[in-house]
Amino acid sequence: MTVPSPRSTPDAPARMLVLWCPDWPAVAAAAVGGVDAALPVGVFSANRVVACNAVARRSGVRRGMRRRDAQSNCPELAVFPADDGRDARLFEAVARAVEGLVVGVEVVRPGLVAVPVDGAAGYFGGEHALVERLLDEVAAAAGVECQVGVAEGLFAATLAARCGELVPAGRVAEFLAPLPVTELDQPGADRAELVDLLRRLGLKTLGAFADLPERDVANRFGAAGLLAHRLARGRSERPPLRRRPPPELALAEEFDPVVERVDVAAFLAKGLATRFCAALAGHGLACTRLGIYAVTEEGEHLGRAWRCAEPLTPAGVADRVRWQFEGWLRAAPGQRPTSGVVRLRLEPEEVVEGRSLQLDLWRNGGSDEADERAARAFVRVQGLLGPEGVLTPVLDGGRDPAGRVWLVPWGDPRERTTPPDATWPGRLPSPSPATVLDRPVPAQVFDDGGRAVGITARDQLTAPPRRLTIAGGAGREVVGWAGPWPLTGDRRRPGPRRARLQLVLAGEGDEPPEAVLVHCAGTENPLWTVEGVYD
């Protein structure tokens, strides 16, 4: 019996080849810093690990880890700050090497490049021959290791590159089915909340999510969930858009004097990006594949396409223009242009319906302008005080309320650094204290007999708490308590048993009862502190 070959659906994505350079931020940082690739390297943002190489991972360094913990696990760790411009500048050599063999190169982000595979595979004698030629070319021209994957669609091809697999044509759904649903939360996709919800609903794999009826997914998870559902099924991210962007949407700008510095290009890119996205929005469109083309004073023509999984915002367009100028103007001698850029053109090479960019119903159309004014004010303050002069909080994983909040300089990505399924032994249950004290206040907790309450070796209280004194003040009656929650996650730290406790204190006069979060260390002569106050 003959088995029929898989048939492609009308909106099946094109077959793509993705070349992935693992741990690219760490690789780029080590190259710029002159660090041997055999040594552990970590890249940090806001004192959190955002990337590290395999040597560092073997020593216990992980993404999202605090800097002090990473250096504790690996004292010889080479520390570098996150720098998107540096990553993009060095990745230009990789993109140029790929472009030397295959046309239609699209940079997804520094470290990841995609190309359509059909034409090139036919020219080189098959996909396997093309992959081998690419690996050799990148290793020879750029001197970096990489992995290649081939599959239908950018999403599946990216996952295939991480495995180094060439998925047979028409079998992408079978390839995706056993993979964990956490793969949906790719960089820039912002699907952490959706992935967390799917896991709590028991949908642990892409196949389990793909088996849900499309109508039910749309009703329960909305447009974002429907797009993720299409990816899990191996379909294109969006149904094909037959509407071609009008040619006048391409934005060109002449520069006089010429642009020879990256900081000047970054400044000019902000205004161009705003005008570019506004013109697209006026036609109900948004860009997902951006062409950046430049002409130098000597007549050299430069060009690169950048692909994004989500519609590009003005900030996203400006970032990609800045990264591309980093690659052009700061390339190695012999590879950079011989003169400054006199003309820049932004071209929307792929567009989608711009529904996701519409104003929120409850904003009354007025908050976008206010947000933009606030953003400009923050940038001005940073210009006076430095990047650390304006910080915004990000809620992340952790055991205690203070440790879950970390501050990010304005303009840096506000993303969680710990995976949604990370476990935190001793983590407090919700709700968190409304006020977390910068410096814990000394306190004492007593039982009915006036004896100090401590923590036993079995992480239990030595007696029920009945009275609390704070900083040597008058004692207050404890009318309720919850816990203790032992802090046993950090086994490297020697010392007494430690735990947290929630206490409800009797109100004074007409005041209502008050709840506080306290910390205890030790059984004999226990040390108590107040760490937070609940509303």
Image: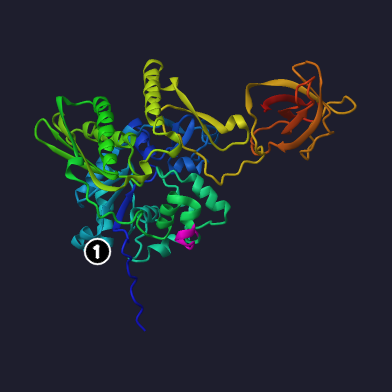
Say whether residue 168 is left or right of residue 516: left
Residue 41 x, y percent position in the rendering? 43, 36
The stretch in magenta equals 209-216
Q: Which colour assignment does the render follow?
A: rainbow
Q: In which quarter of the image is the N terminus?
A: bottom left
Q: Which amino acid does label 1 sit on?
A: Gly
Say if residue 89 shows up in the picture.
no
**Classed neighbour count for the residue bearing mark 1: other residues with Cα under 10 Å, few (<14), some (14–19), many (≥20):** some
Say whether residue 227 is left or right of residue 525: left
Q: Closest to the observer: 363 or 398?
A: 363
Q: Is mark 1 on a helix, strand or loop?
A: loop
In the picture of the structure, the residue carrying the numbered disc 1 is 126
- Image quadrant of residue 412? top left
Residue 100 x, y percent position in the rendering? 19, 48
Residue extending farthest bottom: 1
Residue 480 x, y percent position in the rendering? 79, 33
